[in-house]
Image (spheres, rainbow, N blue to C red):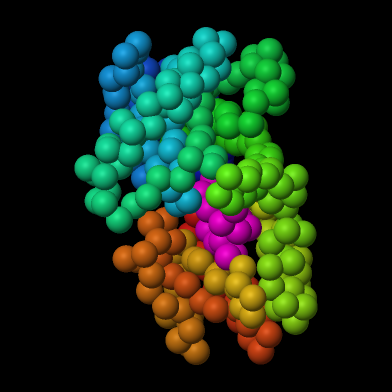
Amino acid sequence: MAIFKVSKNKVEQIGLNLDGFGSEFELRDLFADNLEAILGVRFLVKEYQTTDGRIDTLGIDENNAPVIIEYKWKENEEIFAQGLFYLDWLLKNKKHFELLVERECGKGVKVSWEHPRVILVAQGFSRYVQAAVETVKNVELKSYSYYGKDTLQIENVFTPKILQRVVIKREQKTSIGHDEYSLEFHLNQTNLEVRKKVEQLRDFLLQLPEVEETTEQKSGITYKTTKSFTRLEFKKTWVQVLLREPNYKSDTKQLVRDVTAYHWGFLGMVKLNADIDIDYIYKLIKDSYESTL
């Protein structure tokens, strides 16, 4: 991809710098120090010691899911197996991670183990890794390109579609529901009038460039670019619309409520009900979307 600098109606191409990072440690430290800005993940610790090796970076996302981040300076096929190895270790040692979250974030944050994530970051990935990653449900691939002396580009190479199951336990009887969390599952949680509003809003959002929709999660439907910018959480008669970066100046009706104390990763919330002006809600979400670009 060609990157250009524009000045006084003239363009100058910025060359690709294959040695933009002097080492893997520089790459790791830049991401770790700017984890929320780059990946939308809350930083917990880097170089986390396990019983067999060190995890490059550990974080927690806006859904309180654990996030493992592994980096490779160049293209390296070993990163895939390494990421899966550390995920296996983490799932066998959940208490270690929960204690880490309690220490760094406080006792009010409850870890969600429904969808732990592994993010692999490298300059590129071989066709073998890109084929293999489609067979697992937790691993994401992101490539980086360094241009000139101070321009970093991050590309989403692969994002999995997570299929989760509902498990219901009642006394001695255990049953597994085979309904996957899906668009239809979430829409069915609310009434018909609100559902129509959400469908209209969804049409608007999916027309925005670089937007990904994630429906396969219990919490609701999330929309993201490189970072999540809104999540829709469904109630019987309304939908809770969470905003990553609310623009209070454009909220002339003062509908947005500050939820910083309750939702890490999302700072504002507005209620979507049957009487709401959907164009106004879309405008609020679009402001949040633009903050992630």
Q: Which image quarter: residue 55?
A: top left
> In this picture, which residue range is highlighted in magenta?
218-233
Q: Which residue is rendered at x = 55% and y = 70% of the image?
A: 241
Q: Quadrant of the N terminus?
A: top right
The correct choice, above or below, for 104 with respect to 250 in the image is: above
| Left or right: 233 in relation to 180 | left
Residue 75: where, in percent of width, then height?
Answer: 54, 14
Number of numbered callouts drawn:
0
| Left or right: 245 in relation to 143 | left
Q: Which residue is the extreme one toward the front?
A: 172
Q: Which residue is rendered at x = 72% and y = 77% of the image?
A: 191
Residue 9 visible from this viewpoint: no
Q: Which residue is rendered at x = 32% and y = 66% of the image?
A: 261
Residue 215 visible from this viewpoint: yes
The correct choice, above or below, for 254 with respect to 192 in the image is: below
Q: What main secondary structure does the magenta stretch of the protein show? A: strand
Q: Which residue is the extreme one toward the left?
A: 103
* Of 191 and 128, the residue lying toward us: 191
Query: Is 185 one of the magenta-colored residues?
Result: no
Q: Which image quarter: residue 45?
A: top left
Q: Which residue is rendered at x = 77% and y = 59% of the image?
A: 184
Residue 26: where, in percent of width, then height?
Answer: 32, 23
The correct choice, above or below, for 29 with respect to 124 in the image is: below
* Of 256 and 27, the residue lying toward us: 256
Q: Which image quarter: residue 13?
A: top right
Residue 146: where, in percent of width, then height?
Answer: 47, 29
Query: Is 232 one of the magenta-colored residues?
Result: yes
* Of 49 and 265, the residue lying toward us: 49
